[in-house]
Image (cartoon, rainbow, N blue to C red):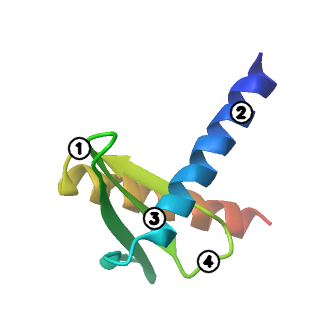
Amino acid sequence: MEVMERELKEEENKRLVDFVDARADKRKVFYYKGFYGSLVADVESDRLVGKVEGIDEDIVYGGKTVKECEQRFREAVCNYRMTELAQ
């Protein structure tokens, strides 16, 4: 069951990355600890989504408000940096 849930989450993550990358109106709106984050509106799901830009990994985040997205972006950057330091 865990494998299936992880695979579904990975598929959704990939879909969101493709969605963000395909948007012409994508903007780098967040900056934190040397990383930029983009943000676009996903009208179908009624939320904002973005991704950490300029890295090899596809790290996405989302939320209902810009403030919520910024917080999730900062959390994603911290998690990414911790992972990189551990390697």
**Above/below status of 23 relative to 61:** below
Point 26% across, 41% down: residue: 46
Picture layout, residue 22 above or below residue 35: above
Q: Position of residue 25 (x, y in %)?
A: 31, 76
Upstream in sequence: badge 4 or badge 2: 2
Q: Nearer the viewer, residue 57 or 83?
A: 57
Cα gap from disc 1 to disc 2, whole angstroms: 23 Å
Q: Which mark is residue 55?
A: 4
Tag shown at residue 77: none
Q: Which residue is mark 1?
A: 64
Q: Please tell me which of labels 3 and 4 falls first in the chain.
A: 3
Secondary structure of the residue carrying numbered label 1: loop
Q: Which residue is mark 2?
A: 6
Pointer 3 residue: 20
- Type of amino acid under label 2: Arg
Q: Residue at x 63, y 37 (%)?
A: 9
Is label 4 or label 1 in front? 1
How far apart marks 2 and 3 lie (CA) works out to 21 Å
| 1 vs 3, front mark | 3
Dot 2, how many residues are within 10 Å of its Cα: few (below 14), some (14-19), or many (20+)? few
Under circle 3, the secondary element is helix
Examine the rendered structure and indicate whether residue 51 appears above or below residue 30: above
Q: Which quadrant is home to the C terminus?
A: bottom right
Label 1 Cα crowd, 10 Å radius (few <14 / some 14-19 / many 20+): few
Given this view, does label 2 or label 3 mark the residue nearer the observer? 3
18 with respect to 87 (left or right)? left
First of labels 1, 3 by sequence position: 3
Between 31 and 7, the residue placed more toward the observer is 7
User: Which residue is at 37% across, 78% downward?
Assistant: 24
Percent from the top left, x then y, of residue 50? 40, 62
Q: Earlier in the sequence, mark 1 or mark 2?
A: 2
